[in-house]
Amino acid sequence: MNKSSFPNCQVPSERFVESCGAVLFDLSDPHAKKVCLIHYLKKDEWLLAKGRRNCGEHRKDAALREVLEETGYQCHLHPVTMPTRAPPIDETANVMDKARIYPNLTEPFMFTTRGIDGGSSVKLIWWYIAALDRDSGVNMQPGEIAFRAEFFPCTEAVEKLTWPADVEVLKRAIELLESS
């Protein structure tokens, strides 16, 4: 049996959970973009909206559903120009595996792995960029009772987040949004 030169780690389904989230922007004023954070009232933490993907659910759909459930806001994935190692949709044979920049992508822009259950299991979080639907300036539904959603200017949102990993996600989302 051959040994792979690539490091790998196999994790069975009972030891991982897939989550999806989106950084929700209010782009109604292009000169004053805002970001929606959720305040987890019980722990007084400021977070980005995310949650577990249901069986059979597409990741994009899970991200949008979780934003709606946690914030009460309707939104859509917002296309950005970004680098990715994924090949183009019209891939031809022998496309090299390297990062290329594509316009108008609504693919995950970041991926987070987090150890859970004392490190014996892992949470995988796929991150997307979303924008508030035009007719959704007010919460269309209440959102989860444990959270309160609030929009902040981008720089204030970066400072307000509780966890450094969320700060990294938000900074990257802002960078991609501003460069698109």
Image (cartoon, rainbow, N blue to C red):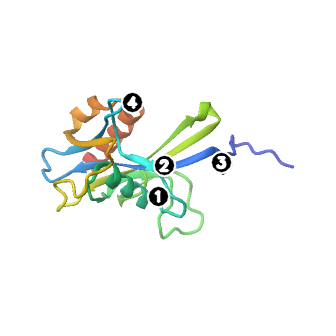
Write the residue at 39% across / 29% down: 164
Q: Secondary structure at mark 2?
A: strand
Label 4: which residue? 163
Residue type at the position of mark 2 = Ser
Write the residue at 50% across / 58% down: 54
Write the residue at 28% across / 33% down: 158
Seen from the viewer's position, the closer of residues 4 and 66 is 66
Q: Quick one: label 4 or label 3, which is nearer the N terminus?
A: 3
Q: CA distance from mark 3 to mark 1?
A: 19 Å
Label 1: which residue? 59
Label 2: which residue? 19
The answer to whether residue 95 is left or right of residue 143 is right
Q: CA distance from mark 2 to mark 1?
A: 8 Å
**Where residue 2 sits: x, y (%)?**
83, 48
Q: Secondary structure at mark 1?
A: helix
Seen from the viewer's position, the closer of residues 131 and 40 is 40
Q: Secondary structure at mark 3?
A: helix
Q: Are marks 2 and 1 in contact (CB under 8 Å)?
A: no
Q: CA distance from mark 3 to mark 2?
A: 14 Å
Q: Quick one: label 4 or label 2, which is nearer the N terminus?
A: 2
Q: Quick one: label 2 or label 1, which is nearer the N terminus?
A: 2
Residue type at the position of mark 3 = Glu
Residue type at the position of mark 1 = Arg
Classify residue 123 by image quadrant: top right
